[in-house]
Image: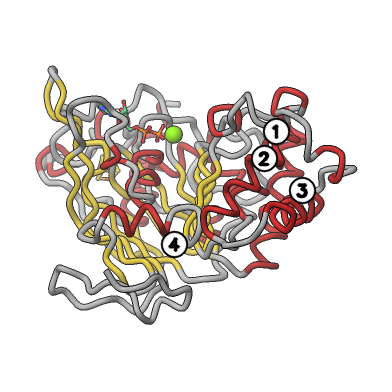
Amino acid sequence: MTELSKSGAAMTEPVKDSRPPSAFLEVRDLKVHFPTDDGLVKSVDGLNFTLEKGKTLGIVGESGSGKSVTSLGIMGLHTAGQYGKRKAQISGEIWLDGTELLSADPDYVRKLRGREMAMIFQDPLSALHPYYTIGQQIVEAYRIHNKVDKKTARRRAVEMLDRVGIPQPDKRVDSYPHEFSGGMRQRAMIAMSLVNNPELLIADEPTTALDVTVQAQILDLIRDLQKEFGSAVIVITHDLGVVAELSDDILVMYGGRCIERGPAEKVFYEPRHPYTWGLLGSMPRLDREQTERLIPVKGSPPSLINIPSGCAFNPRCPYADVPKDNVTRTVRPELSEVGSQHWAACHMTQEQRERIWIEEIAPKL
Ligand SMILES: Nc1ncnc2c1ncn2[C@@H]1O[C@H](COP(=O)(O)OP(=O)(O)O)[C@@H](O)[C@H]1O
Ligand code: SF4
Ligand SMILES: [Mg+2]
C-alpha cells in the first residue's frame, strides 16, 4: 500500500479500471443491500452524487430512507462486521480524493477514518466512552494519527474544545461525558471529529436529539467550522428546513434512491418532485407563493424488501391515479434535468402536474 498522503497525490491505485473523477467525493451507483430472513433489504439502491471541498451537501429523507446506511457506506463501516454475521452487500464506487474506497484495502480505509474523513452522530453518548474523560478521548483520537506526546495532544484537545465553544476548556477537558449537557456533548464530539482536520465531515442527524435553540447553535457551529477548515460536509437530516440554509446542494432520498437533487434554494423554493413538496408541507411555515398547495405526505415509507414497482412513491403520490397509461406503476422514473443542475425522478412535467392539480385534485380537497 502506498503511503497516506493528505494531498491525495500518492494514494493506493484504484483496483477498478473506471476513470477517477475530478470531484473530491464522487459516489457512483452505490448499492447497500442486507440479506435478512425476510428477504433482501435494499437500503440504498443506486445512489449517485458528487461533492467538492468547501461545499455542503444536505441529504434529506424520512426515517428509513437509507441516509445512515449511505453515510456508513462512505465511511467504510459496513464491512467492519458490526451488523452481526451477515454482511452487507455493497457495490458501486466511492471516490474520495482520487481513490476508490470500496475496492481499497480495508486497512487503508480504516486509516482514512478520523483523519481524512470523520463522522458526527445523532447521539454523542454512543460515540463517546463513558469511562474516559472528554480530554482523554480527544487526545486518543489525535494521537492515533499524529506522533505527538500527550502534553501536546492535550493542548490540542483544549484548543479544539475552545474552538467549538465549550466554556473553560482547560477545566472541562477533564470532565466525563455524563457531566456535559446534550448540546455540550455534541460540541465535544464535533471537537473530536475535527481534531485531525478531516477533509470530509459527515454529520448524521447532528441536532435531532437537541432542543431547538441548541440545534441552531450547533448548525451555526458546523457552518463556521466548515468555512474555517474548508472541508466537504454532508449534513443528513429528516428535516428539509434544517439543511436548506446550511447546504449548497440538497439530495432528497426516498426508498434508498435519490428522487430529487439540486442547488439548495431550487430544491427548497422550487421543488419538482411531489415527495419533496410533501416534505415541505410538513413544515410549519413557508413564505413564498405556492402553485401547488402543500400537503404533508400521507402513508408510510415503502418496504425496502418489496419496493413498489414503477415509481416507488406511487402508493402515496396524489398524482399517481391520474395518468391513464399506468406508467407510474410499471416504469421506474429516472432522474431527469428539470432546471440548471436540478434533477427530479418523476414521469410528469411540472406543467402536467400543475394542470392535474388545478383540474383534478384541488376541486376534491
Ligand atoms: N444491518 C441491517 N440489516 C438489515 N436492514 C438494515 C440494516 N441497517 C439498516 N437497515 C435498514 O435499512 C433501511 C435504511 O436505514 P437507515 O439508513 O438507517 O435509514 P435513515 O434514513 O433513517 O438513516 C431501514 O429500513 C433499516 O431498517
Ligand atoms: S412518477 Fe408518478 S407516482 Fe411518481 S412522483 Fe411522479 S407523479 Fe407521483
Ligand atoms: Mg439515520
State which quadrant residue 13 falls in. Answer: bottom left
Image spot of residue 15 (x, y percent): 16, 68
- Separation (CA) of disc 3 from disc 1: 13 Å
**103 or 43: nearer the viewer:** 103
Please state which amino acid type lies under the numbered disc 4: Gly
Are dots 2 and 1 in contact, CB under 8 Å? Answer: yes
**Residue ranking furthest to the top:** 37
Q: Is residue 3 above or below residue 310?
A: below
Work out how far the residue at label 4 is from the one at label 2, CA to CA, in angstroms: 41 Å
Amino acid type of the residue that numbered disc 3 sits on in the rendered structure: Leu
| 104 to 60, vertically: above or below | below
Secondary structure at numbered mark 2: helix
Splitting the image into four quadrants, where does ligand 3 fall? top left
Q: State which mark lies toward you, 4 or 2.
A: 2
Q: Is residue 222 above or below residue 130?
A: below
Q: Earlier in the sequence, mark 2 or mark 3?
A: 2
Colouring scheme, one of rainbow, by chain, secondary structure, one colour: secondary structure
The residue singled out by tag 3 in the image is 161
Which residue corresponds to the image point at 35% horizontal and 61% vertical from the top-left?
Answer: 49
Q: Closer to the N terminus: mark 3 or mark 1?
A: 1
Closest to the observer: 112 or 301?
112
Residue flagged by tag 1: what amino acid is it?
Answer: Thr
Whole-number angstrom distance, CA of label 2 to CA of label 1: 5 Å
Residue located beneath label 2 in the image: 136
Crowdedness near tag 2: few (<14), some (14–19) or many (≥20) residues, C-alpha within 10 Å: many
* Percent coordinates x, y for residue 10 in the rendering: 35, 79
Tag 3 secondary structure = helix
Residue 262 is tagged as 4
Q: CA distance from mark 4 to mark 3?
A: 35 Å
Taking the image as drawn, is residue 221 in sight?
Answer: no
